Amino acid sequence: MAERPPETSREDANARGAGMTAPEVEAWFVRDVLPLEAVLMQFLHRNWRNKSEIADLRQDVYVRVFEAALQKIPDSPRAFLLATARNLIVDRVRRENVVPIEAIADWEVLARDEPGPDRQIMAREELHRLQAALDRLPPRCHEAVVLRQIEGLSRREIAGRMGISEKTVKRHLADGVRALADMLYGERPDKP
Amino acid sequence: MSAETNTQAAVPAATIESEAADWLMERDSADWNETGQAALDSWLAQSLAHRIAFLRLEATWGRTERLAALRNPDGARPFKARMPVLFAGIAAAAAIVAALGFAGARFVSAPADRVFSTPVGGRELVSFADGSQIELNTDTVLRTHMTTGARTVWIEKGEAYFRVKHDAKSPFVVIAGRRRITDLGTKFFVRRDLGRLEVALIEGSVRYSGGNRRTSELLQPGDDLVAAKETSLTKKTAQELANEIAWRRGVLVFRHTTLADAAAEFNRYNRRQIRIADADAARRTIDGTFLTNDIEAFTDAAQTIFGLKVRGGANTIVISR
């Protein structure tokens, strides 16, 4: 856990001159950080009582990690992500005078890099996982996403096929991608 | 901790995510245009939280595209229409069995689906049972789905050279995000960088389809198509194209190439990165052939030909005046 989580503000960062370009950081974020979301969510759930605030915490952690990466890409994304989450919780606890559930439980354990299939999921497993996630969507939402992403129909065609307005199709697709993001990134792959 | 971080939760994450999903679906629509893109760019620029929320959903949406591999080529519905839960029972059980059986035939047959990747500086030639070959350049990831009825390759990033045995019954399709290249009997290469796709045809013919499903080009030999924010098509000579795929021989060929572009090429193949610190120096052009990992030969040339200063570290080499 050698790396220090971000303690500087964006102003400081700009004064030093950003080290990485935004596309580089975006690519790194999608490749190395998003696959760790399940671990991050597990950590936040164990350490934050108010479940309605978890999504906001996750967002703040991501913003801090992204800002830091614009300076330098951390060597261990996992350790860095969790150290950032821990610091954020410590800050909140100090400021709001609340007591965390398990006083930052299992940070050390979770932060250990685990070698494993996280990065290189075989195409087959990926397809299984995608299909399982898709099948958990509500029926109408499921249908709209299948028609769009698998059958490649336009929104108008989907509206005709499902007998609903294009606007409703868009609503189903937008709801679908949000639910899929939580399933594909926020949950462990082995979850049913 | 900075005050800035404290105020970030002012807009709930759920609101931002909902807006991001709307933008993503807006962009995915058939009538997406420059006005929309400008509005999206400005929304993205408003805060990092916006950008991250969008990036996360965009990555999710991109992943689900892989399910298109399950599409039944006959045009039949690949998934059983879902039954209302109330009417579950035997019919639904049968549907599940059918779906699993289908899945088994499509992608559980082990070697049909594979992932190939090369590290920075790596190169790999993959031969398939049908006689087609794919050669992966440095820092490349691709997935393949090869069955008798369909041959699909997803290029996640990097560059690859394709030599395809044409088979009208089994189209060979290369997919990069929403863009696709369909082989009609051919040698071509595809390079995918962030936000940019290049397809160059050496022999035969391929059809290129853009993300919005309206752009469709039948490429001729010598055509070099670059799809970024705009799509452009240029003609290249056989020699120019040969130079572009000189990496297959382990070399980089530069012809009136600026030092900046040449350095960027070397940086694709080596962990040790070259940085040209001086705008004037960056604009100088060079000619020559270099081994992809021979950074010294390049810095020597910069030093002796242009009289530039070279400062070397373990990870970075800085070239300046």
Image: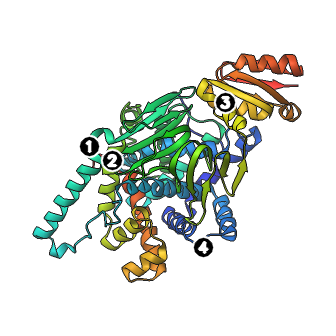
Task: Give residue B221's position: percent from left, percent from top.
Answer: 64, 46
Task: Say whether marks 3 and 4 touch (CB < 8 Å).
Answer: no
Q: Residue at x 31, y 69 (%)?
A: A138
Q: Which quarter of the image is occupied by the C terminus of chain B?
A: top right
Task: Give residue A163's position: percent from left, percent from top.
Answer: 38, 83
Mark 3 lies on a secondary structure that is helix
Amino acid of disc 1: Ser
Quadrant for residue B98, please give it: bottom left
Mark 4 Cα-neighbour bin, 10 Å: few <14, some 14–19, many ≥20: few
Residue B93 vs A164, above or below: the answer is above
Read off the residue under disc 4.
B31
Residue B148's mark?
Answer: 2
Rounded to the nearest angstrom, the CA distance separating label 1 from label 2 is 12 Å
Badge count: 4
Mark 4 lies on a secondary structure that is loop
Q: Nearer the viewer, mark 1 or mark 3?
A: 1
Marks 2 and 4 belong to one chain: yes
Task: Give residue B75's position: percent from left, percent from top.
Answer: 35, 65
Residue B109's mark?
Answer: 1
Read off the residue under disc 3.
B267
Mark 1 lies on a secondary structure that is loop
Q: Nearer the viewer, mark 2 or mark 4?
A: 2
- Earlier in the chain: of badge 1 and badge 2, it is 1
Q: Chain of mark 4?
A: B
Amino acid of disc 2: Thr
Residue B59's mark?
Answer: none
